[in-house]
Image (spheres, grey):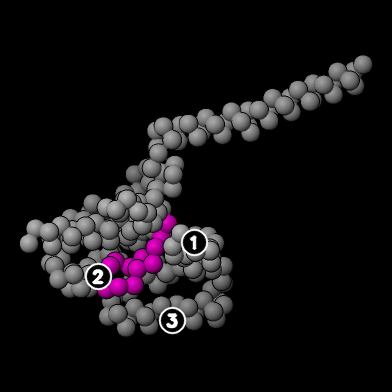
């Protein structure tokens, strides 16, 4: 009788825990996320003026044109387009400092930066821990300021307010360093160009 009673108790506890952890908790998080934080809960996907997705504000994007601020290099190969298959996953290079491949990759990145006549900043040469970091430091953004302004045919002073606007502060005001969200900043610059052309 004791074994049967304990077996039923174990089954009952398992069902209760399953109900809490597999149904109640996920549904509660879903409702709270969608109700209070819908933008981040849905991936922080940014839409353009045509209501089409242009990327996530949480994931680094590749920008190569001189008119755009460029983000951190990544070992992840980003997919382009809705039907594209993923070609990379989150994760750093996992190469040791003594690995010649790491040195070769850094040298290649330095050479590319010098070809673009931009000054070198650490976060424009080295990848982030996840390989998906959407931010660069204020220093790296300021080093690209003149190149972007020249390519767009505007003054640097026209970019600085947007640079300040799309700089995220420290997490909880104490952790990390302020960083510039590249996707938000570049899209704001594109919108500024469109408004300038419309007002001419």
Question: What residue would you read off at disc 1?
Answer: 83
Q: Secondary structure at mark 1?
A: loop
- The image quarter containing residue 148 is bottom left
Q: Quadrant of the N terminus?
A: top right
Left or right of 191? Residue 74 is right
Looking at the image, residue 192 lies above or below residue 109: above
Q: Mark 2 to mark 3: distance in Å?
A: 24 Å
Disc with the residue nearer the chain's start (2 vs 3): 2
Left or right of 167? Residue 111 is right
Q: Are marks 2 and 3 in contact (CB under 8 Å)?
A: no
Most common secondary structure along the magenta stretch: loop
Mark identifier at residue 107: 3
Disc with the residue nearer the chain's start (1 vs 2): 2
Q: Residue at x 41, y 44 (%)?
A: 40
What residue span does the magenta drawing correspond to? 59-71
Question: Any magenta on residue 121?
Answer: no
- The image quarter containing residue 147 is bottom left
Q: Please tell me which residue lies in front, 171 or 25.
A: 25
Q: Residue at x 7, y 62 (%)?
A: 200
Looking at the image, residue 6 lies above or below residue 32: above
Rendering coords of residue 22 (x, y %): 63, 33
Q: Is residue 128 visible?
A: no
Question: What residue would you read off at disc 2?
Answer: 67
Q: Residue at x 15, y 66 (%)?
A: 156
Rendering coords of residue 143 (x, y %): 26, 70
Looking at the image, residue 75 lies above or below residue 99: above
Crowd tier of the residue under label 3, counting other residues whose Cα lies within 10 Å: few below 14, some 14–19, many 20 or above: few
Looking at the image, residue 120 lies above or below residue 132: below
Q: Secondary structure at mark 3?
A: helix
């Amino acid at each position: 009788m004791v074994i049967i009673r304990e077996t039923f108790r174990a089954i009952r506890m398992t069902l209760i825990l399953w109900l809490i952890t597999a149904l109640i908790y996920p549904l509660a998080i879903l409702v709270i996320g969608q109700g209070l934080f819908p933008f981040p809960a849905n991936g922080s996907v940014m839409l353009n003026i045509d209501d089409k997705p242009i990327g996530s504000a949480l994931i680094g994007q590749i920008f190569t044109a001189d008119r755009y601020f460029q983000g951190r290099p990544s070992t992840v190969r980003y997919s382009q387009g809705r039907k594209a298959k993923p070609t990379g996953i989150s994760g750093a290079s996992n190469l040791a400092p003594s690995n010649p491949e790491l040195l070769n990759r850094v040298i290649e990145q330095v050479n590319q930066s010098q070809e673009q006549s931009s000054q070198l900043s650490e976060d424009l040469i080295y990848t982030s821990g996840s390989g998906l970091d959407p931010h660069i430091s204020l220093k790296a953004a300021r080093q690209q300021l003149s190149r972007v302004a020249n390519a767009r045919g505007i003054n640097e002073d026209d970019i600085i307010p947007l640079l300040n606007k799309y700089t995220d502060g420290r997490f909880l005001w104490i952790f990390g360093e302020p960083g510039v969200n590249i996707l938000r900043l570049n899209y704001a610059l594109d919108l500024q160009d469109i408004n300038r052309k419309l007002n001419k």
